[in-house]
Image (cartoon, rainbow, N blue to C red):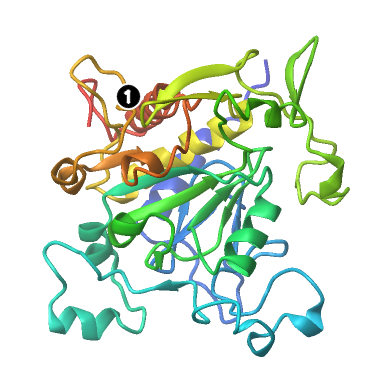
Amino acid sequence: MIHEPFGLRPLRSLLGLLLMAGLAPAAEVGDAVPRTGDEIVVCGQLFHTTTPVVTWMDPGGYDGYRINRRFGPFEESDWDQIKDQLSEPARYNLRMKGLEPPLTAEQIEQVRGGGWSMEQLQEVVDQFVMHYDVCGTSKVCFKVLHDQRGLSVHFMLDIDGTIYQTLDLKERAWHATSSNSRSIGIEIAQIGARSARSRHQLDEWYEKDDRGMRLTIPSRFGDDLGIRTPDFVGYAAKPEIVVGEIQKTELYQYDFTPQQYEALTKLTATLCRVFPKLTCQYPADETGRIIADKLPDAQLRDYHGLLGHYHIQTNKTDPGPAFDWQRVVGGAKRLLYTAGQLDTAGQ
């Protein structure tokens, strides 16, 4: 056992007290503000998630504020080259439409330029929407969402568990129709669920080996998949295909990767701590089982917490029957409890 030198522990305690008392050395002009690589951005403020995050400001990030294409020939990427294909340059706007109660004229004047205070945003955000991207990787997702469809989402979650943030959470991303103004959205990299008739499409994405169901991204996507973990090999969290009903339709889906679940759990706990109205729960029936259909309008209006895209729209099925709601929500609650933000009875 290694023992600390005599007197070092009291010195550490004293330094801790000095830091807590605001007596740390004053910042000097030009001092860099350190980041650890796990922060998300909310109203310009940084919050730790304890899992890797790449923001739109970082090398290799995906910038939802850009009006130009992110991929393709550079000389063909500016707005003049693509304006006939998209309705407008921006892929996001002001959190205002459909809010209850609506923003006052004074509030609109304040936030129209992006000047949300943390307190204002905490009064608005109360839903966290789960999507699967039907693209397989976050790189392809951003290409389709931003470059081709003119849409946006706050977060993307790649197969190796890397989280990408594309916009400050104060922005209204375009990902969930009627819930856009009050929600945060995440696109989880996965090819998604299929009906019995089209389940064969999953065969080129998964292959069984002695470790389980291995993710095999088709060769047509090339070698540069944008995965940040070198030589990453992904496996579905469950070894067999999952069959379940969404919107009263039987669907087949392989599970997400353990790395995705771990990162999503930590992000969920972070968001539930930052946003007091975002309850750490999922839509459940009286038996505690996940509701597998769109929520009635009145129930959706009153709901605060995590939910799927299919809870908002009848024409959606993501995040699919394989998504383990209890794993994410239960894990997030344990993290919040450890952080002293949740009692044993729930949030």
Q: What element does badge 1 sit on?
A: loop
Q: Is residue 57 visible?
A: no
| x and y, in percent, of residue 200 in the image | 69, 26
Q: Quadrant of residue 273?
A: top left
Which residue is rendered at x = 38% and y = 29% of the image?
Answer: 329
Work out which quarter of the rendered image holds the C terminus and state it: top left
Q: Name the quadrant containing residue 7.
A: top right
Quadrant in which the N terminus appears: top right
Residue 239's spot in the image, x, y percent?
65, 13
Judge left or right: residue 142 versus residue 280. right
The residue closer to the viewer here, 305 or 39, is 305
Q: Which residue is rendered at x = 21% and y = 65% of the image?
A: 98
Residue appearing at x 88%, y 48% in the figure: 223
| Relative to 252, residue 189 above or below | below
Hey, what amino acid is under mark 1?
Ile
The image quarter containing residue 130 is: top left
Q: How many marks?
A: 1
- 279 over 289 or under it: above or below: below
- Spot the residue most to the top: 210
* Residue with the mark numbered 1: 290
Q: Residues within 10 Å of mark 1 (few under 14, many from 20)?
A: some
On the question of residue 99 being in view, the answer is yes
Is 347 or 286 nearer to us in this picture? 286
Q: Nearer the viewer, residue 99 or 316?
A: 316
Q: Is 186 placed above or below 283 here?
A: below
Q: Residue furthest bottom?
A: 80
| Residue 262 image point, x, y percent | 55, 31
- The residue sitting at 44% across, 46% down in the picture is 16
Where residue 228 appears, as percent x and y from the top left, is: 75, 47
